[in-house]
């Protein structure tokens, strides 16, 4: 079935669709995303930006895959979630009961000024999953689709994003353990033994056994 004609402006008002096949269109979308990232404090704003990027990128992703002879029907995105993930930057869940829909999630640590290009790549990565057959994962069809999107849309999608894709800060962790003797800090995502029983351990740097434990503020998971 042929795809409908591409418009130049997405339903969200951001540059999208056919415009993204031209360098100027991609640059305009990056600029629009970057402007929004400067205001993206809070989960609600992050989720709204993610939804707008899905609306802008989705039709162009479909067309590029269609032109490459790959499955091109983007599943209906029924929810967008912002997570506090530090290892998984994005995910696409396709329910077994209805593979015509999908649920997308993105790490809140992607949303900071200067990271628009990386954010676009991660969103496009998950939209590629949302077009391909369930269970394809990062197989051969995914690699063909990734190459097509990178070539046609000027993206830099990778199978696994670099660690620099997310904000490197204390916000990635939930707990900070500080040695009272030398001041060296250790960060943990989960409340393991060191966090729960710091008196049982010694500092790996100075050998002393006096620690102070702090609970850090993190991005909470929020359903759409």
Image: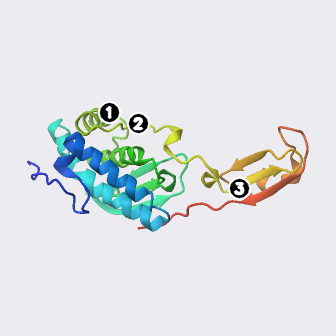
Q: Is residue 207 left or right of residue 157?
A: right
Disc 1 or 2, which lies upstream in sequence?
1
Residue 4 falls left or right of residue 171: left
Specify which label sits upstream in the sequence, 1 or 3. 1
Return the residue at label 1. Answer: 143
Residue 224: percent from the left, percent from the top?
A: 41, 67
Q: CA distance from mark 1 to mark 3?
A: 37 Å
**Residue behind mark 3:** 175
Label 1: few (<14), some or many (≥20) within 10 Å? Answer: some
User: Mark 1: which secondary structure?
Assistant: helix
Q: Is residue 205 visible?
A: yes
Residue 47 place in picture, x, y as percent: 41, 63
Contact (CB < 8 A) between labels 1 and 2?
Answer: yes
Estimate the x, y position of residue 202 in percent, counting from the top left.
87, 44
Q: Residue at x 71, y 55 (%)?
A: 175
Q: For marks 3 and 2, give the CA distance.
A: 30 Å
What is the CA distance from the residue labelled 1 to the residue labelled 2?
Answer: 8 Å
Q: Which residue is mark 2?
A: 159
> Quick one: SS at disc 2?
loop
Q: Is residue 130 visible?
A: no
């Amino acid at each position: 079935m042929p795809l409908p004609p591409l418009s130049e402006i997405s339903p969200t008002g951001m540059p999208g669709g056919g415009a993204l096949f031209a360098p100027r269109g991609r640059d305009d979308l990056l600029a629009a995303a970057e402007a929004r990232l400067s205001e993206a404090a809070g989960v609600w704003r992050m989720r709204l930006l993610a939804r707008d990027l899905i609306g802008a990128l989705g039709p162009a992703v479909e067309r590029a895959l269609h032109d490459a002879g790959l499955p091109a029907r983007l599943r209906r995105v029924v929810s967008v979630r912002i997570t506090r993930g530090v290892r998984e930057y994005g995910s696409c869940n396709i329910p077994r009961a209805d593979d015509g829909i999908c649920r997308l999630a993105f790490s809140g640590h992607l949303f900071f000024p200067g990271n628009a290009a990386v954010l676009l790549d991660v969103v496009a990565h998950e939209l590629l999953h949302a077009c391909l057959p369930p269970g394809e994962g990062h197989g051969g069809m995914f690699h063909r689709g990734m190459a097509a999107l990178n070539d046609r849309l000027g993206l830099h999608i990778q199978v696994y994003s670099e660690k620099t894709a997310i904000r490197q800060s204390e916000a990635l962790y939930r707990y900070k353990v500080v040695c009272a003797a030398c001041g060296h800090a250790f960060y943990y995502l989960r409340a393991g033994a060191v966090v729960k029983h710091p008196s049982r351990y010694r500092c790996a740097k100075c050998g002393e056994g006096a620690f102070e434990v702090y609970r850090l503020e993190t991005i909470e998971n929020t359903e759409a």
